[in-house]
Image (cartoon, rainbow, N blue to C red):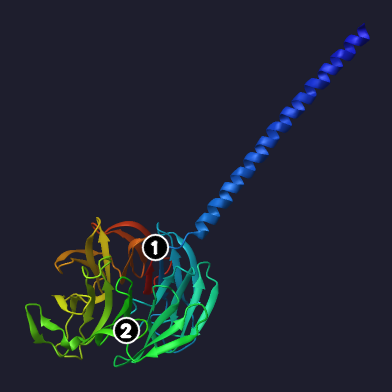
Amino acid sequence: MFQKISVAKQVVRLRRSFDVYNLEEGFGMVRYLASLGLLFCLVSSVLAQSDRPPAVAVLRDSESAFDGTDIYHDHAILLDSEANVIKTISGLGLYQSWSHQNMLLFDMAHRHLILIENQRDRLSVFDYNGTSQLTIPIENANAITLTADATMIGCMVSKTLNEQQTVYFETTTGKEIRRVNWGGVALINDVVGSQFWAVGKQLIAFEPEGEISVRRPLTRLPAEPHHPTVINSRNWCGVGVAVEPNANHWNRRIWVIEREHPDVKGSLNRLFAVDPDGQSRILVELNDIDPRSIACATYKGDLTLILVVDGATGDLVSFNSDGERMRKVELGVQMVGFGEHSGLWVAGRKSMQRLDPSDLSVVAQHTFEQDADPVGLAVH
């Protein structure tokens, strides 16, 4: 009887220890599965973040002047919507031109960043991870844009302000498709109007196939807003062009900034707007504002701001769609850009900032480790 009880107790102990073992193993399996789930979530999160396109990219010129030597210290920085750096692409070769408004752009269809390396006489294409995808040899490039279907890159080349061409390349191969004998120093793709707008010594609107719809020398634009027949024949050069982000083709304007030149007597700092058919609508004398960069932004639905960077002070000056000056904000910037998805951004030597279009207050900011001139800005 004693042996039977002992055996029974031993059996109970064994069962209990086996149950405890199973329980511990169960908890271990739960912990293991939980850790796998957490790892899966982390990996998914990282992949989702890496799959997200950058909000903005800035091209930075680290040398104050190009002395002809092959020193490539310039770089492009890609940031997210909170101004956190996603990627830095180093070893680029570039220098400032007449206008640096259109020296880089996003190719969202192929998840690429396209930029001008004018010091190396080429266009360079990178993916969002900074891996080189394509280089296209081209001399004297100063502005690029992309067709609406992302099949062609339009590149403006200028030996002088009076000697300009637009060259089209196939986006994925870099093969040259065609050249046309007109261009400018600043360029933008008017997606709604299905045409490009270029400005330099003249304002031109043309289709990617090459047909011109608007062609107006700046000398044929009104010199006084209330006297449209008075012509200023001494204009120097337009250095920036922006299109109001309005889905209605005819209820919007194309805005241009024009700079004076000390060697061109009578030239003026001006902001003016034309309709899609090229007819002048608004003219603003900027006087002591030295316009270097321009963007059109929307806020509160359909209200439009026209934003101009004063190159002399670094201030950002805003105008409404009637050309009336609204406010000036001291930011110390050199470039401004707007994207429908990522909003309003400015770039300076020291930092990048995302602004609230309603009051131009700073929403997000990144301060660079080293000062450098921004010479290109692309906003998604």
For numbered disc 2, what is the local secondary structure? loop
Q: Residues within 10 Å of mark 1 (few under 14, many from 20)?
A: some
Q: Nearer the viewer, residue 14 or 184?
A: 184
Q: Position of residue 144 (x, y in %)?
A: 39, 79
- Residue 240 picture quarter: bottom left
Q: Amino acid at mark 1?
A: Thr
Q: Is residue 14 left or right of residue 238?
A: right
Rendering quarter of residue 358: bottom left
Q: Position of residue 143 (x, y in %)?
A: 37, 81
Residue 205's spot in the image, x, y percent?
A: 28, 81
Instruction: For the N terminus, give its image quadrant.
Output: top right
| Residue 333 left/right relative to 29 | left
Left/right placement of residue 352 relative to residue 320 reads: right
Amino acid at circle 2: Val
Return the residue nearer the eye: 366 or 102. Answer: 102
User: From this viewpoint, is residue 293 visible?
Assistant: no
Q: Are marks 1 and 2 in contact (CB under 8 Å)?
A: no
Mark 1 or mark 2, earlier in chain: 2
Up the image or down, 248 lies above or below 364; here it is below
Crowd band around label 2 with a 10 angstrom C-alpha radius: few (<14), some (14–19), many (20+): many
Residue at 49% x, 76% y: name it.
125
Residue mark closest to the camera, 1 vs 2: 2
Label 1 and label 2: CA atoms lie apart by: 29 Å
Q: Is 319 above or below relative to 177?
A: above
Q: What secondary structure is marked by label 1? A: strand
Q: Which residue is mark 2?
A: 185
Q: Residue furthest left?
A: 227
The residue drawn where x is 18% and y is 66% is 321
Q: Which residue is mark 1?
A: 367
